Image: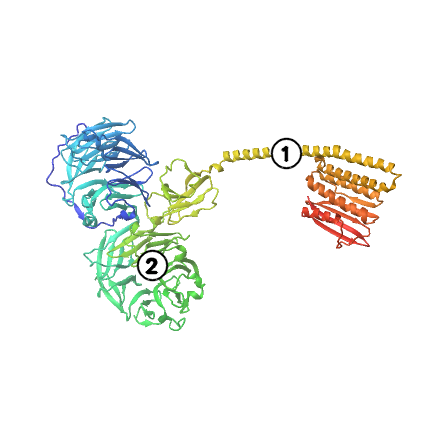
Amino acid sequence: MLRKLYFTFLLLILISTPQLLSQNSGISFERLGIKEGLLSKEVQFITKDAQGFLWLGFKQSISRYDGYHFTHFPQAEMLFGLSSDHKGKIWFANINGLFSLDEKSLKIQKEISSNLHDTFPENDHYENIYADSQGRVWSNDFNNIKCYEPETKHLKVFRITPSYQFNIFKSRFVEDTQGRVWVTNQWGIQCYDPQTKRLWKVLKNQSVSDIAFLSKDSVLFATPNEGIFLLEISQKRIRPFVKLPSMSDVPVFLKPAHLPSHFWLGTDRSLYLFNAQEQSFIDFSNLREEGITMKDCYLDTQNQITWLASSVGLLKHDFAIDATLLQVDLPQKLVAFPVKVTCFFHENSERNWLGLSHTGVLSWNEKNNDFQMFAIPDGASVNQLLKDDKGNLLACTQRAIFRLNLEKKSWEKLISFSTNIKKVCLTRQHQLWCLPEWGAIQVYDWQTHQLVQPWKELPYQNFFQQNVFTDILETEDGNLWFSAWFPKGFGIAHFDIQKKQFVLAENQNKHTDFVTDYYLSLAYNAPNTIAISGYGGFNVLNTVTGKIIRTGASGNLKLKGGNCNSIVLDKKGTIWMGTTEGVCSVGKQNQVSYFSEKDGLTENDVVHGYSLNSANQLWLGFTNQFNILQLERLQQKQIKSNLKISTIEILGDTTLVNTHESLVFEPQQNNLTIRLSPLNFKSASQNHIRFKLADIHENWIDNGNAEMISFSNLSPKHYELLVQQGDSQGNWASVPLAINFEIQPHFYQTWWFQTLVGFLVLGAVYSFYLYRIRQIKEIYTVRNKISADLHDEVGSTISGINIISNILKQRLIEQPENKGFVERISEDAKKIAEALDDIVWSIKPQNDSLENVLSRMTRYASELFEAKNINYQLQLPEDLSGIALPMEKRHDIYLIFKETVNNIAKHSQCTEASIKIMIQKKSIILSIQDNGVGFDTNQKTDRNGIQNIRERVNKYQGKLDIQSNPKTGSSFLIDLPI
């Protein structure tokens, strides 16, 4: 228990002097500022929520960072503090009170309101917010430490000042493994014991900036003026530990670093990495020179990143890169700066040789970081380092080649060149092949150092004068391969050591397979593979066949910049190229990624030393420094996916949605852009995304490095979007992120509306049907009434006239001069009766069927032909059921038939007639023929029979064909649609 743990703080005069390293030991920081999306370059607070989003506090704003974009939550008042708990809330405060922000719904809720109308200022302040593992929220005001319990809404207040005062002070909070909360401020150190629920004063009357645990029982704390002290809890003892590197620095925070026993010490002017075990500091002089004030620190152990809030923005140190990338500074005491590392030679696992742009060659022992300088006599730039057959180190400059005497630490000049040489190759044939900047290749016998000519002849005249050779290497079969610029061809060739002749690759491959005519670098991967890079991409060839087996054009692979300066090929078949945009890797499946300054590389422009050693380490030369890239770590296959939805853009407007609830969108919100983040805060080139919509996309759609997935004109339905996270080497997470969302239909697309409309349509159709039935019944009633009236009244009257005329005919036998008039009356009455009978028949609804029409037509023709003693044939269709005709059309068809048959009976003088009635498709066809005297179809006549037939046929867009011949009779072919 800490009840009796009170210390009398006696400062000792003698405090151990720190060891200060002037260099930064390869630790670099990426800086994010206003250009990258910050609202202000001065970041005050920093924390991380349970999902993995990073939260930043500014003077009057809160921002959430997903590794790609910042989402801002502006505040009207100055921010007092920012912290996150483990229950999904972000806590902050301002003059209006204490607030919580739900990290899922992003809704802000006021937890405690300030009382600004009283004279008691303490209830208006909640400074330096800290949320512990139990969800308690800690803060301070002018005189007190406050502890708020959200579940019970209870606020505890612990007075720590000896007397009442009105100055806000800075407090730092940290929780130990036992759940105790330690507090540091200008009043000393306090500790909250959750067992007793009391705050004990551990150290009084001494300003303490921050506290950090060295072990479970040992605590380090930093003071503004006296350095760092060690508190041994069980011994109840405080002792001086180490002085600060600069006593003028005021400590701001002391936080655990990524290395054991290491701590980040932020001050008002700089930053240090403190090694507690060695009691030494790494000083970041570049930050000190800028006068940067450190504000806060957060150690992201999940992503292996240190985040630093400062006066110049957000600083990021990816310490996972420390295991992937080693940055080594050249010793300025051995070589004048600036100097470039131009080439490497790897002797063994400990000793490596570095060629420099001036002075000579450095030997570097990686194990103890020891450098030795071996100066070249003329101090020229070293283009290449290699070993001879006896194991001696050779250094090639533009004008000479030197051999190192390691015992004497001196160089012996072996060969002087007459022209500038940029590349050499010492072959198994004991020949030194030298590539000049321009002109013919020079070959020396290594034993005699005399020029020789190994080739019998050249491929064509001026072969050396027209072309520029850039690189050379020897394969296992002893052949020599060259990269070059062939203005009139393609710059790949090899020298066949057996045939002693040059072979041009363009003679063995399609010209379209070459990515350029200007190649720059070669790489060999035993047994039979060689890779060549240049302006426009790379090619891979089989050294046995000379055939191009792989083409990587910059345009097709979307390589940045397009120029591939240097190339190596690792054991897994991955191609690594130095470009102006960093190191570019291309996997076997053409997965492209870049490792650049954002990932910790010294520079993006990789054009100098470039070498792959047997440990699969890529060595890169820069100015005053070189980098070692661990390719094995970059190619790790295990992907830990933490994909989250960051924001959703609806119709181009960014919308903050609660992504942990059902995503339901209005019908007009069917154009969506979903922004995702793996929340690993790596360079975008290291993250790949692919997706598919379940039941829509059969295969994955590669989204590349883009974090946005867009959909347009989505139909109303439920969707399941599957998203998979991958890396730059083509490895993918085993479990994809499933995002379910729904586009709601318009009201007229809903099932209930469509059902209602269906019922309404059915109701309308049924109502119309009933109306038509009622109307038809009314029409039938009228037609029956008319038919009855005509038959009963007019018909009976005509019948009476006919009877009376017959009586008159009998009585007028004695008066023959009047008999003709009476006969005419009788005949006209008979015609009227027949016409009236036809009208009555046509009006009756019972006769609307085609079957009744044909029956009447048959009866009429039979009666007429039999009366005229005409032999006739009548052929009718078999099935007439279900065919009904309108009254008018039925009447006209009957009259057409009647008129035709009547003409035959009256005028044709025929003895035989044929009637054939057919139903074809939707037409009735009448074919009527006789063997009579015929007539002239073109002769005009005052009779209306034929004209009436023609008019009635045309009325229904029918067809009438009349054929007549005095010898064969007449034929009528009538086609009427029904």
Q: How many marks?
A: 2
Q: Is residue 481 left or right of residue 853?
A: left
Specify the label residue 775 is tagged with. 1
Question: Looking at this view, is 888 or 241 the one in front?
Answer: 888
* Three-letter residue code for mark 1: Gln
Q: For numbered disc 1, what is the local secondary structure?
A: helix
Vertical position of residue 853 compared to residue 533: above or below = above
Q: For numbered disc 2, what is the local secondary structure?
A: strand
Q: Position of residue 587 (x, y in %)?
A: 39, 52
Q: Is residue 406 left or right of residue 737?
A: left
- Marks 1 and 2, Cα distance to the nearest angstrom? 93 Å
Q: Earlier in the sequence, mark 1 or mark 2?
A: 2
Q: Is residue 185 left or right of residue 762?
A: left
Residue at the extreme left: 13
* Three-letter residue code for mark 2: Ser
Q: Is residue 464 visible?
A: yes
Vertical position of residue 587 compared to residue 851: above or below = below
Q: Position of residue 292 (x, y in %)?
A: 20, 46
Visual colour scheme: rainbow
Question: Looking at this view, is 366 or 417 the one in front?
Answer: 417
Q: Where the C terminus falls, by quadrant?
A: top right
Residue tagged 2: 566
Which residue is depicted at the point 76% across and 41% down? 857
Which residue is depicted at the point 34% across and 48% down? 684
Question: Looking at this view, is 300 or 943 the one in front?
Answer: 943
Q: Quadrant of residue 791?
A: top right
